[in-house]
Image (cartoon, grey):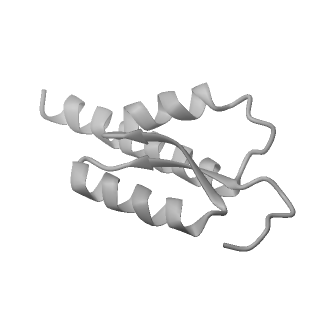
Amino acid sequence: MRARATAPMSAIIADDEQLAREELKFLLDQIGDVEVVAVTANGLEALEAIERNATRPRRDPATSAILELARQGLEAYKVALRRQP
């Protein structure tokens, strides 16, 4: 592992498969430049984790992308419920 000049990138893992979450966290922990701040089982939990971590001093582009994907997923779910209640 190389020395860090800056704070590590933060990551929130969201996957409905526990094994996938565990494997991804293990891999990210091995990198050393990534801090896993939350591991969640779905998009709603990921949104909550993002909100809990919103006061972190560094906001990563990846966090913004995850937030947008989660919101899109929630909107798609709402549309599906309206069409097929």
Camera-nearest residue between 47 and 34 = 34
Q: Determine the residue located farthest toward the bottom in the rendered image.
A: 2
Image position, residue 47 (x, y; %)? 49, 33
In this view of the protein, can residue 17 be seen by the observer? no
Residue drawn at point x = 33 percent, y = 52 percent: 21
Q: Determine the residue located farthest toward the right in the rendered image.
A: 5
Image position, residue 71 (x, y; %)? 47, 40
Camera-nearest residue between 54 and 33 = 33
Camera-nearest residue between 84 and 63 = 63
Residue drawn at point x = 84 percent, y = 58 percent: 6
Image position, residue 42 (x, y; %)? 32, 39
Compared across the picture, whether 71 is left or right of 60 comes to: left
Tell me the quarter of the image containing the C terminus: top left
Image position, residue 63 (x, y; %)? 61, 49
Query: In the displayed structure, would residue 80 be above or below residue 82?
Result: below
Residue 55's image quarter? top right
Residue drawn at point x = 42 percent, y = 42 percent: 39
Tell me the quarter of the image containing the N terminus: bottom right
